[in-house]
Amino acid sequence: MSWDVSVQRFGKEYESIADIPDTERCMELGSQTEIRRVISPFFPGVDWSDSTWGIFDSDDGSVEFNMGGDEPSTGFMMHIRASTKIVPTIVAMCRSERWQALDCSGGVFLERAMEPNSGLEDWATYRDHVTGRT
């Protein structure tokens, strides 16, 4: 179980998923190698031993980067099991590349959200309820 965030770039930056026209297509982010070069400074120590599935572990939690196999890539998924301390790093990474990070549970772009932590907080509450954590 994770909080899932999908990362893409569009022809323009959208305020919400509802603003994306049916004719919009994801733009290329670059090669898998280029994308890993962007991610790694924001998440130092990512284990890229499987180049299609990076794993970042820290005291604040973990992020798995599901890169898929497309070359060049038009997006990737982040599977997050971490505290809200990780969210500003995700937002900063996306802003640096004009990427948009879609909170799959809430349908909002993190870099546009008034409260980008809310999806992760909701996920943590649900996780704690399901697993019996208090």
Image: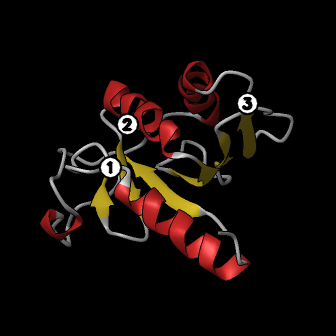
Measuring from the top left, give residue 3's x and y in whole percent. Answer: 55, 62
Q: Residue farthest to the front?
A: 134
Gap between marks 2 and 3 measured at Cα: 17 Å
Q: Amino acid at mark 2?
A: Val
Question: Which callout, 2 or 1, points at the residue further toward the start of the chain?
Answer: 2
**Labelled pair 2, 1 in contact (Cβ < 8 Å):** yes
Question: Which callout, 2 or 3, points at the residue further toward the start of the chain?
Answer: 3
Residue picked out by circle 1: 116
> Tag on residue 46?
3
For label 3, the crowd category at 10 Å Cα-Cα, with few meaning under 14, some 14 to 19 and many 20 or more, is: many
* The image quarter in which residue 49 lies: top right
Residue drawn at x 49%, y 50% as measured from the top left? 75
Residue 68 versus residue 72 in the image, above or below: below
Gap between marks 1 and 3 measured at Cα: 23 Å
Question: Which callout, 1 or 3, points at the residue further toward the start of the chain?
Answer: 3
Q: Residue farthest to the top?
A: 41
Colour scheme in use: secondary structure
In this rendered view, identify the residue nearer to me: 77 or 60.
60
Residue drawn at x 32%, y 49% as measured from the top left? 116
For label 2, the crowd category at 10 Å Cα-Cα, with few meaning under 14, some 14 to 19 and many 20 or more, is: some
Residue 15 versus residue 111 in the image, above or below: below
Residue picked out by circle 2: 91
